[in-house]
Image (cartoon, grey):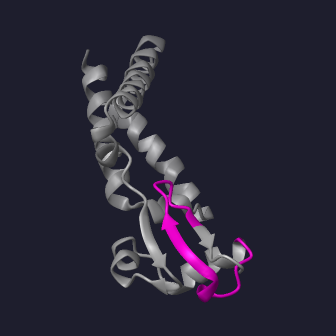
Amino acid sequence: MDIVVRAAFIFAFLYVLMRVVGRRELSTLEPFDLILLVVLGDLVQQGVTQDDYSVTGMVLAIGTIALLQLGVSIANFRFPGLRPILNGEPIVVVQDGKPIEKNLARERVTLDDLASAMRQQNIAALDDVQWAVMETSGVISFIKKPGS
């Protein structure tokens, strides 16, 4: 039972941590970030199972985290009012070719980051953008102006 409680606590802690870290940071995975994820996984495992290396302990820990994730997914589907809390909301970062500085700062996105995302979608100039939206996944979606 102790493993279930620790797994539930770790799940809640990591869920909140990922929401605080921000969607932009989570959308890009650099080599150092990959190493941190591996280290984080090992630390979480140690915190959840401690010295219990049994198959039962592993099943309890994984099962608890899987059930909690399923519960969050079901809550997200059934209760639309919870979606902004659980997933966040898309944020408009460019409107009519003009960056919205307040929203860019909120998401810690620089104009260089924005320009890089534009280039990846074959958009040459900010003036060609009708809307740019930072999705809940951290990806920036662009809608071009008509005729651009």
**Residue 61 picture location, percent across and down:** 39, 23
Quadrant where the N terminus sits is top left
Between 62 and 12, the one nearer to me in the picture: 12
**Residue 146 picture location, percent across and down:** 66, 76
Q: Quadrant of residue 64?
A: top left
Looking at the image, residue 91 sits to the left or right of residue 81; the answer is right
Quadrant where the C terminus sits is bottom right
Residue 116 visible in the displayed image: yes
Q: Is residue 146 magenta?
A: no
Q: Residue at x 59, y 86 (%)?
A: 126
Looking at the image, residue 83 sits to the left or right of residue 139; the answer is left
Q: Measured along the vertical axis of the image, is residue 126 above or below residue 66?
A: below
Looking at the image, residue 82 sits to the left or right of residue 94; the answer is left
Residue 50 visible in the displayed image: no
Q: Residue at x 38, y 84 (%)?
A: 101
**Residue 91 picture location, percent across and down:** 41, 65
Point out the residue furthest to the right here.
Answer: 122
Q: Residue at x 32, y 48 (%)?
A: 84
Point out the residue furthest to the front here.
Answer: 146
Between 79 and 119, the one nearer to me in the picture: 79
How many numbered marks, from 0 up? 0
Looking at the image, residue 34 sits to the left or right of residue 9; the answer is right
Q: Which residues are magenta?
A: 121-141
**Residue 123 picture location, percent across and down:** 70, 79
